[in-house]
Image (spheres, rainbow, N blue to C red):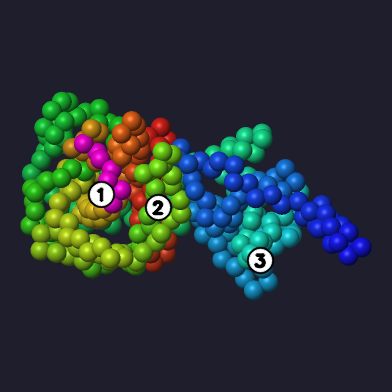
Amino acid sequence: MKNKLISFLLLLMMLVIPLQANTSCKLILNGITYKPTYTPIISQKNLFLSLDDLVNMTYSTYSKSSNNTYLWSLPKTTLELTTKSKIVKVNQKQQTLNTAPFTVNDVLYVPISFLKLADYPYTLSSDLTQFELTSLLPYSTSTDTYTSHTTLSTDYTKLEDIFTPLLKEDSQPLIKTAIKYNQYLSFASSSYKKDILAGLNKVIGSLPELEVTFRNLDLLNDTPTCNNLTTYPLKVISDNNGIRVKFNHTDMVYECLWPTYNPNSHTTAIDINKSLDVMIMRALYENYRDTYDLKDDIHFSPITTVQMGRSDSITYTVYSDHLLDQTHTYTVTIYKHITPGKINYIVDLGAHTITS
């Protein structure tokens, strides 16, 4: 009788809480297989991911209050959700949904349909076996004031005089594209070194708090994977011939100067502030590239393009040939994410066909 009672109670629990850990659900982030920190769960024909994994996939943040209420901050949208409650506040406006978040071993699981509340696009197969998401541009809540940047005059009369020798062809199309899409153009050079270093020294002295965030990778398996993000405090100081970049156990001196120009200013002046940005982003990129033994020789370009936007970004095309029979091509993107009093440089990897 006792055994029958136990069996009945177990059956009842399964009917009331039909949770199923789903190790067969494949997660794809920016075209690469994503290895979740916590196993996805399927319940009542809905896919649930841990909030920690969703935050890692979307460059978002969350905070938790004492009453099991979570504040999830996504680009342009804040979701306030409570464990086991179908009521969600979207930018302070209340909505009632069909499913509710729940916790398993103190880990909050959220139905992926909550992403729709923030207009965050994703794809889910009808049989719930594959979930795909492309990260949106990190949303800076503060912006850079480019009109206040320090500039350095040069002897060039027009931008074509700078970039045509580098390209060894007409640079007019490059400059017109940069103007159209609001891009800066940069290249490695030792010209005006003394004046650039003096300008960098002044700009570095006014930097806010800095951080760097890296996407963790495992590129040695038959199926390369990406996973969570790791953030470190970042320190940038002046050095005799460049800058010194320090984070975690890394202490590197970066001496390659990257004078950077703004075609939209219709001048040939070097933007010192943006030149410092490119040097920092380039140093972080090279560290990331070398950490994972990525190569960029095939796709080398003498000119680096800085895409301006809510968060500025630089993208490089790289490849990995760890596997003898395969060559995987990726993009490494470095974002400059600005919040009040802080700059976070985010370094992430995506499949070559994915753009941010």
Q: Amino acid at mark 1?
A: Asp
Mark 2 lies on residue:
216
Which quarter of the image is occupied by the C terminus? top left
Q: Is residue 87 above or below residue 122?
A: below
Q: CA distance from mark 1 to mark 3?
A: 41 Å
**Region rendered in magenta:** 289-297
Q: Is residue 165 visible?
A: yes
Task: Give percent across and percent down for residue 330.
Answer: 35, 38
Mark 3 lies on residue:
69
Q: Amino acid at mark 2?
A: Asn
Q: CA distance from mark 1 to mark 2?
A: 13 Å
User: Which residue is situated farthest in the right direction here?
Assistant: 1
Q: Nearer the viewer, mark 3 or mark 2?
A: 2
Task: Give percent across and percent down for residue 110.
Answer: 64, 54
Q: Is residue 271 magenta?
A: no
Mark 1 lies on residue:
290
Seen at 59% across and 42% down, the residue is 24
